[in-house]
Image: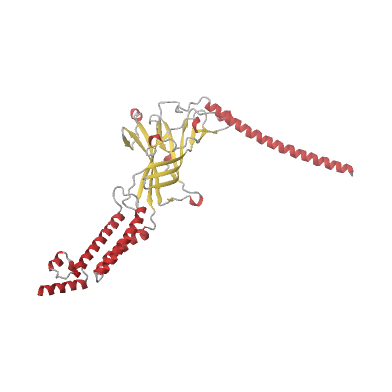
Amino acid sequence: MVINYIVLFTSISFIRSQLTTQELEEENAQEIANRSYVEEQNELQRTILSKYNKRVRPILNISEPLDVAVHVYIMHISVNQLEQTITLNGHIYMTWKDEYAVWEPSEHNGVRITMVKQWEIWTPDLKITNSVSGVGQFFEISKRSHVIIHSNGKAWSRIEIYPTFSIKIGCKFDYSAYPYDTQKCALGIYTTNRMSEVQLSVYYNMQPTVLLGWGNQSNKRHVSDWMIDSVVMNVSYFSGGKYKSEKPTDAEELDVSWSILYAWLTLHRNASSFILTLLVPILVSFIFVICSFLLPAPDSAIYILLANLFFLGIFLEDFAVMIPPAIGQLPKIVWFIGINLILTMMAIFLHLWLRYLLKREDTVAKWYLYVLHAKKIIPKRSRAALLDDTTTGNGS
């Protein structure tokens, strides 16, 4: 019996020792694998960067331009209609061929992808044509991104980079159709290199991607008072102080030309409550002006018109805060409110004049009525009183 217990205890201890050894072996294997991968990456990056010159375009034939394909991801927009600016936030995807950062994957345990810091290899120096920061811009596009290198053997590697950006661009807004105005503004991206060195292109002719939300909000296009209608991208070429749509091909012309990528944003104002908050009050005020001439006495009309004028003053005080600055042609709603205000004041003076005619003790000459067409605008009851008074005065 004692021997059986001893055998059982020995077996349990042996099994425990085997499990512990197996777990330790698994942990050691994982550590060894991780350590090997990190060491392989470090060795690969040392091999790539040891003879790499980040100030030189990564192309063996220096007479050929380097093509950089660009795709823009827009994550957020903010419109400032007072400053006439749009702030854009997102990512810029860029890819190109690098003939210097190369390696043979079979010589590095089959590793085909590595990642280095942006400032360790050559990257295009991008600028924004219409940035409010001007030529001194530096922080709009991140300089601290990581670069992904895909090996294609010792011939060349594919470079990919996703720098973030936060750019405020200047635009020219037209508020003449407020509050149903549509604004169009462009984000211009160019590189400081001439086209003989670097040429920008649209990545597979894909239009910019708008990602204002995730999941169920991935189709979101509405931000504040604005709705994004479309975002399209095209390439323009600047040479000799002019913009051209045709790509230059002559070597001498390429040396004095720059390629510019334009991402055109089209937005319209989402004025869902315009009819209720703006148009209806103005129409009611306009109806008061018309109806004032249907009242039997000028005194009642004057009181209503003064109340209408007071209402317009309060309305204009709030409206002045809502409306954007008048640049160029005035919005139609402003013209309508201005005409309504002028008509209200004219109606007040006209009713005061009619009241003066009715209160006069002497007779009114007929030429007053015909020259000023008072017979057409004076209410019927007041017109009858005036005509009777005029007839009596002429008869006497």
Q: Is residue 79 left or right of residue 307?
A: right
Whole-percent x and y of residue 329?
A: 28, 49
Q: Is residue 275 above or below residue 227?
A: below
Q: Is residue 47 left or right of residue 182?
A: right
User: Front-most of 47 and 298?
Assistant: 298
Whole-percent x and y of residue 135?
A: 38, 34
Q: How many marks?
A: 0
* Residue located farthest toward the right when viewing the structure as drawn: 1
User: Front-most of 284 and 179?
Assistant: 284
* Residue located farthest toward the top when viewing the structure as drawn: 51
| Quadrant in which the N terminus is drawn | top right
Q: How is the image coloured?
A: secondary structure
| Quadrant in which the C terminus is drawn | bottom left
Q: Is residue 89 left or right of residue 48?
A: left
* Residue located farthest toward the front when viewing the structure as drawn: 361
The answer to whether residue 382 is seen in the rendering is yes
The answer to whether residue 377 is seen in the rendering is no
Whole-percent x and y of residue 289?
A: 27, 64
Whole-percent x and y of residue 203?
A: 43, 39
Q: Is residue 68 above or below residue 386?
A: above
Q: Residue at x 83, y 40 (%)?
A: 10
User: Front-most of 47 and 358?
Assistant: 358
User: Front-most of 306 and 372?
Assistant: 306
Q: Is residue 122 above or below residue 302?
A: above
